[in-house]
Image (spheres, helix red, strand yellow):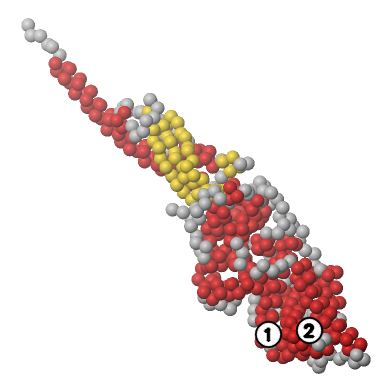
Amino acid sequence: MKRFTGQVTVFLSLTALSLFALFGTCLEGSRCACLDYLCAQAANSSLRSVFAGFQGETMREYGLLLCPGREGGTEVWQDVMLTHAEKYLRPGTGTLHADGDRIGLLGLELESQNAVYITEDNGAVFTEAALTYMKSAGLAQLLQEVLGRLGLYSEEDGAGFLETIGNMIGDKDSSLEGIVSNLDDIREQAAALQEEARQKAEESDMEYEPPAGTSEDVSTDLLEQIRAIRKNGLIAIITGTEELSGHSWESPALPSRLSEAEKMRHFGFGNEPDTMLNHLLLGEYMQHKMTSYAAGDGGDARYEAEYVLTGRKTDKASFETTVGEILLIRMGFNLAYLATDAEKVALAEATAAAIMTLLALPQLILLLKWLLLSAWALAESIVDVRGLVRGRKIPLWKNAATWKLSAMKLDLSAEGGGTAGLSYEDYLRVLFFLGDTNKQSYRMMDVIQERIGQQVPGFRMRDCLVWASVTLRADVSYLYLNAPFLRTEAGPRSGRRFRKEAVYGYGRR
């Protein structure tokens, strides 16, 4: 009797088992490769989805892409990213719809490697964002237009011009109180010398007569005008009866009030070089996006540009400091013109010579002459600024036709300027170029926060994310076959782990 030992059955069973193992391994390997790609896509897409939720108000008003990253000091953008990632990796909750779960997601975790906020890198992150916006608006044409208004046609000329302006201001007291004191000192010195000459003439029984071409107004009207300035304030002489804005920049939540440690986080992240061209563009950003005194009513914060330039705690103080610096600039150019006008120099020299001759102090004639010329230049500068704040333009270099004060006295009814020359906004540009870029960047962020905060309560610039680097970790279960050799990383016993990195930021690739 023939016996059946089952060799064929065993053979066929082993063959089938091998085929099923091979088939399962291929399926699981294909699934593993697909999941690896899907996790990478989920990491990148979910991070980009976070940045797609940018703050609409800052984009519309300031051209800045800023992503809400924190709320009340707690980072929330990671939770938003996890929500988006689950839509990719959990079937039926997002873009993937299926009757069965072919992914088998067991766990999803997010680890933030780095997160950069707009207020970091000592203001350079904001500067880069603002310059990115400005460079999309016709850079060459903009540069040529601004330099042309300043009478310059190259960056090299501009650098020399700004150095000249910087020397004019230097370490001088640009407050209106300091300027009034300076004007008072000059006038009182001249008046005292002239009065001493008169007394000496009377003691010698001589009739005092000022030299031909001079005026008694140098010692009488001018001192009365100085007394009026001391009583009413120089700012009132310049602006008239207009009431200045009382807005305050005292809030401790402003970006400029952040600690140095927080400001210096991610130092070196910004990649825009500190060149004159970039400083010029940043100044244009300020001019286009922020209000100033001469630009008309801008709401509660009317003198935003002046605050950016000076950093004073109130609009009024910012405006007064700005006007004082413009006065110093105008005085420098006006005095330079007077030195080249032979007729006006002769008038000042004749007055000084007559006074010092009576005092028997001819060696001081030169000193008094320059005192008189300085006072004359400053009086003309006050007239210039009165015109600037009213929207007129003042030529940078004056001539006999554009000079307003024909005598050495301050005519408070005069207003300088016309339709040619530099405007008030142009002088703000000059002052901006002379300032510290980092400090100006933080003050501009102060302005943006104040303005946007009126529309979005609780808005803070320090909570605005601009760049992030993350690692997404997804644990998935086995589906077809437990194949440990396919595991990409040690994960849970019932599955495998995928770890994917993603990086994204506005204006960065």
Outermost residue, left direction?
1
Locate residue 213 relative to residue 50 in the image: left or right. right
Q: Is residue 37 above or below residue 168?
A: above
State the mark number for residue 339.
1
Q: Is residue 93 above or below residue 162?
A: above
Task: Give the residue drawn at x 67%, y 62%.
Answer: 310
State the mark number for residue 289.
none
Q: Amino acid at mark 2?
A: Met
Residue 494 found in image quarter = top left
Residue 251 visible at all: yes
**How far apart are labels 2 and 1 at the CA level?**
14 Å
Percent across and percent down for residue 244 are 77, 63
Residue 215 visible at all: no
Task: Give the residue drawn at x 65%, y 73%.
Answer: 168
Percent across and percent down for residue 443 are 64, 57
Q: Amino acid at mark 1?
A: Ala
Residue 44 found in image quarter = top left
Locate residue 248 relative to residue 64 in the image: left or right. right
Task: Give the residue drawn at x 27%, y 30%.
Answer: 25
The residue singled out by tag 2 in the image is: 408
Percent across and percent down for residue 254 are 66, 51
Q: Secondary structure at mark 2?
A: loop
